Image (cartoon, rainbow, N blue to C red):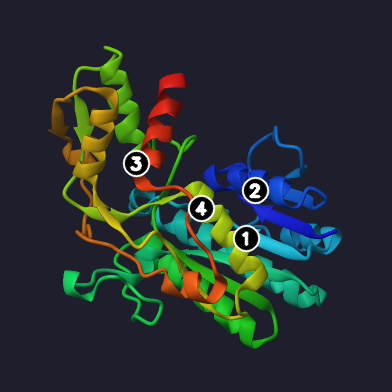
Amino acid sequence: MSKYLITGVAGFVGRYLVEYLNANEPDAEIMGLDMADGCDMPIEYRKVNLTDKGTTLSVIEGFAPDYIIHLASISSVGQSWQNPEQCFKNNTDIMLNILEAVKSCGLKCRVLSIGSSEEYGEYASCDMPLKETYKLNPLNPYAVAKVSQEMLCKVYGALGVDVVMTRSFNHIGPRQSDRFVIASFIKQLVAISQGKQEFMSVGNIEVSRDFTDVRDVVAAYYTILHRGKSGEVYNVCSGISHKLSEIIKTAEDILGIKADIRVDEARLRPNDVMLISGDNSKLKQELAWSQKYNFEQTIKDIVKYWQQN
């Protein structure tokens, strides 16, 4: 019976990961860590501040997991611009505390560190899709923090900690917070279709991003955790880029509406990269991962979620 420790378990991805583990390893023992007061999932739960080194060590030493999936992070680029200090402390210090705890306890434990496509920075369209071999060129505080997190993993990997890493591209799906762009857009469009909102507020909708269904993402994480090569980095992405305007059009067609779209200056980001597309061939060819959810099905499922909530 394997023991899994999941940080950030109450977040968007964490809940789907618990569901995936329960479906695929029903006998697994799962401990979830987060800052939320409580947890309604069928797991052992601890409210923990992972920026505290001693607390982190105590939890990891006590539970002695076989696997650690480190999801806890400030995952918003916009939020990282508003509070870069908190972003660094959250994303870098926690990773350091986890790695140091595993090392000092001498645990036979594999750690999965979740990174971001933001680490690549801006590349020309002719250089797409982004490959794991590309030079990293972070352009915002969140991206710099994630590069630092990855570098820490490589340092501790050289010291004997069994760690695998991702550079995860945008992931979407039902239950995602409307702090994120696709959830925000579709929530607004559903409200317009129900007569509860007059117009749609957007930022730059001409940017293109590589979106993957969160249910495929957690399957990728499980695959990397169990079959990935220690010390390696894997892109987690669909390999297909979609303009935000295209996603809006798809959701409008599903809802049978045409929205009044207005640009809100507050939603525009400094240094926004216009096109991001990832190469997932390493994940597919080396680890035999494949997607189950296509783009249109994901958008339909998100629309249905906001219609019910």
Task: Pick whichever, 46 or 281, lies toward us.
Answer: 281
Marks 2 and 1 sit apart, C-alpha to C-alpha, by 9 Å
Q: Where is residue 230 in the image (x, y as percent from the top left)?
A: 62, 80
Q: Residue 295 carries which label?
A: none
- Looking at the picture, which amino acid does disc 3 mark? Glu
- Looking at the picture, which amino acid does disc 4 mark? Asp
Say few, some or many: other residues with alpha carbon within 10 Å of mark 2 (under 14 / 14 to 19 / 20 or more). some
Marks 3 and 2 sit apart, C-alpha to C-alpha, by 22 Å
| Marked residue nearer the N-terminal end (3 or 4) | 4
Residue that numbered label 4 is attached to: 216
Left/right of residue 134 with respect to residue 25 in the rendered view = left
Residue that numbered label 2 is attached to: 20
- Looking at the picture, which amino acid does disc 2 mark? Tyr
Q: Where is residue 64 in the image (x, y as percent from the top left)?
A: 83, 63
The residue that appears at 67% across and 58% down in the rendered structure is 52
Residue that numbered label 3 is attached to: 296
Marks 4 and 2 sit apart, C-alpha to C-alpha, by 10 Å
- Looking at the picture, which amino acid does disc 1 mark? Tyr
Residue 47 placement: quadrant: top right
Q: Position of residue 109 (x, y in %)?
A: 75, 71
Left/right of residue 40 with respect to residue 185 in the rendered view = right
Residue that numbered label 1 is attached to: 222
Task: Pick whichever, 255 or 259, lies toward us.
Answer: 255
| Marked residue nearer the N-terminal end (3 or 2) | 2
Residue 274 placement: quadrant: bottom left
| Marked residue nearer the N-terminal end (2 or 1) | 2
| Marked residue nearer the N-terminal end (3 or 1) | 1
Question: In the image as oriented, which residue stretches furthest toward the bottom?
Answer: 158
Callout 3–callout 4 Cβ contact below 8 Å: no
